[in-house]
Amino acid sequence: MHNFLDFEKPIAELEGKIEELRHLSGNDDEVNIADEVARLQDKLTKLLQGTYGRLTPWQKTQVARHPDRPHFVDYVKYLFSDFTPLAGDRLYGEDEAIIGGLARLRGRSVMVIGHEKGRDTESRVKHNFGMAKPEGYRKAVRLMRMAERFNIPVITLVDTAGAFPGADAEARGQSEAIARSIETCLDIKVPLVSVIIGEGGSGGAIALATANTVLMLENSIYSVISPEGCASILWRSGDEAKTAAEALRLTAQDLQQLGVIDDIITEPLGGAQREPKNACKKVGDAIEKALIELSGHEGGVLKARRRDKFLEMGRQGVS
């Protein structure tokens, strides 16, 4: 069973009719409804194409947060082999919101690091809803430096509403830890590829996304603040989240136009949540292509180009 978003109500109703007809077909051989099912299936495909071909920024925000959307652990399962998790920052402790470790991507050794939000109540609490504390970013720094030492490419998968804003995180130096992670991203001399797989929120996202190649799934979002947070500041009301989503220009299409990201990865029809394996494969293809393009460059060149890329955004601005 799919979890349907509010704007997917017509899709849900049509899928319900198709399932009912298929159930009848399985119980009464005399009733031939194959043609009717095929007609409704064609109608469903067109409805999905129409709906997902004109999503508003707020609707894309909802899709990016969809509970069935593939998470970091799903990408590890479908895309990477021989994954060996590496825990702890060697300074304070382990942070479950950011997971990282050594793995193989289609035979290539990589260091993969990413946010994990969790799927159900228990796992969401365990992973703190993907909102990392300082030890999470310091773990990321440790793993990126390890990858550099062994000349292994780094892949980061970003999916977070932002860094954890709690008092304990601030007491342990949240802003400094994020800044160190960004600094490390800019400094390492190995290929660094980042993919926004769901929600890329504020410094909590850019701490892992200051990469040579930044990719986004077509229905993911990436912004300095969530639409709800923006609305609460500017309009003093969360009811203006839709207006804020429009103003933030947080979609992959807007960000590619602005030059913030390098490329968009197309999703299966109806979003990555409908075909997780296919979505993971598309992400794997895009990462592999980026690594092939980057592997021909010496470490110093990779570092210089990465730094120049982000400095240029500051020099020229984005508008």
Image (cartoon, helix red, strand yellow):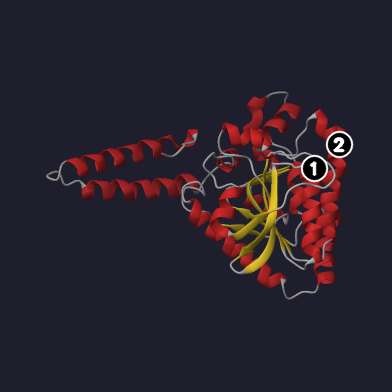
Q: Nearer the viewer, residue 311 or 160?
A: 160
Determine the CA span between mark 1 and mark 2: 8 Å
> Image quadrant for the N terminus?
top left
Q: Nearer the viewer, residue 14 or 27?
A: 27
Q: Residues within 10 Å of mark 1 (few under 14, many from 20)?
A: many
Q: Is 151 situated above or below 126?
A: below
Instruction: Give the total of numbered labels.
Output: 2
Dot 2: element = loop
Quadrant of residue 98 in the image? top right
Determine which residue is flagged by label 1: 135
Quadrant of residue 120 in the image? top right
- The answer to whether the residue labelled 1 contacts the one labelled 2, judged by CB atoms less than 8 Å apart, is yes
Residue at 27 percent across and 38 percent down: it is: 20
Q: Residues within 10 Å of mark 2 (few under 14, many from 20)?
A: some
Residue 85 drawn at (x, y percent)? 67, 52
**244 horizontally vs 74: left or right:** right
Residue at 40 percent across and 45 percent down: it is: 47
The residue type indicated by label 1 comes to Glu
The residue type indicated by label 2 comes to Arg
Residue 154 drawn at (x, y percent)? 72, 61
Task: Kindly give the residue lying farthest to the top in the view shown.
Answer: 236
Q: Is residue 318 visible?
A: no
Dot 1: element = helix
Q: Is residue 142 visible?
A: yes
Q: Earlier in the sequence, mark 1 or mark 2?
A: 1
Q: Is 133 situated above or below 141?
A: above
Residue 140 drawn at (x, y percent)? 77, 51
Residue 234 drawn at (x, y percent)? 75, 29
Determine which residue is flagged by label 2: 172
Q: Nearer the viewer, residue 91 or 201?
A: 91
Residue at 30 percent across and 38 percent down: it is: 17
Q: Is 317 situated above or below 288?
A: above
